């Protein structure tokens, strides 16, 4: 009978065990979209406005969520998980 030796291996980025939960990515900081206008084409909604951080005009499509928070501020979440406050 031969002896078998088990060695510990470092985790690989190519291997993920579904039984082990992965930590959630930190929530992205909420950004503001000023002077916005919403457009609807069928079921799709897009919002255009000025990114308060960069001053650039931005159109956000693929909106996952739209709604107010507890204070009545209006927010959208884009397809990448970025949360935007809609400011007039």
Image (cartoon, rainbow, N blue to C red):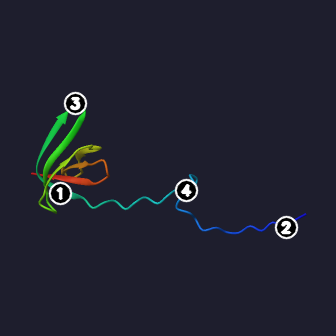
In this view, the mark in front (3 or 2):
2
Dot 2 corresponds to which residue? 3
Query: 83 or 44: which is nearer to us?
Result: 44
**Of the image marks 3 and 4, the number of the one nearer the N terminus:** 4
**Of the image marks 2 and 1, the number of the one nearer the N terminus:** 2
Mark 2 surroundings within 10 Å by alpha-carbon count, few (fewer than 14), some (14 through 19), many (20 or more): few
Image coordinates for residue 11, horizontal then vertical, percent = 58, 65
Left or right for 73, reference 80: left
Distance between the alpha carbons at the discs numbered 2 and 4: 29 Å
Distance between the alpha carbons at the discs numbered 1 and 3: 26 Å
Where is residue 65, by image quadrant?
Answer: top left
Q: Secondary structure at mark 3?
A: loop
Distance between the alpha carbons at the discs numbered 2 and 1: 64 Å
In this view, the mark in front (1 or 4):
4
Distance between the alpha carbons at the discs numbered 3 and 2: 67 Å
Mark 1 surroundings within 10 Å by alpha-carbon count, few (fewer than 14), some (14 through 19), many (20 or more): some
Q: Secondary structure at mark 4?
A: loop
Image coordinates for residue 56, horizontal then vertical, percent = 13, 57
Instruction: Say how many tags the image has.
Output: 4
Instruction: Identify the residue at horizontal 20%, vertical 42% (top origin).
Output: 46
Mark 3 surroundings within 10 Å by alpha-carbon count, few (fewer than 14), some (14 through 19), many (20 or more): few
Dot 4 corresponds to which residue? 16
Dot 1 corresponds to which residue? 32
Where is residue 24, by image quadrant?
Answer: bottom left
Dot 3 corresponds to which residue? 42
Instruction: Identify the residue at horizontal 18%, vertical 51% (top origin).
Output: 73
């Amino acid at each position: 009978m031969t002896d078998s030796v088990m060695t510990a291996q470092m985790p690989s980025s190519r291997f993920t065990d579904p039984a082990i939960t992965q930590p959630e990515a930190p929530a992205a900081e909420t950004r503001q979209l000023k002077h916005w206008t919403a457009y609807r084409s069928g079921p799709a909604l897009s919002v255009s406005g000025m990114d308060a951080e960069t001053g650039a005009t931005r159109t956000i499509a693929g909106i996952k969520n739209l709604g107010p928070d507890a204070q009545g501020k209006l927010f959208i979440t884009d397809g990448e998980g970025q949360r935007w406050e809609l400011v007039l």
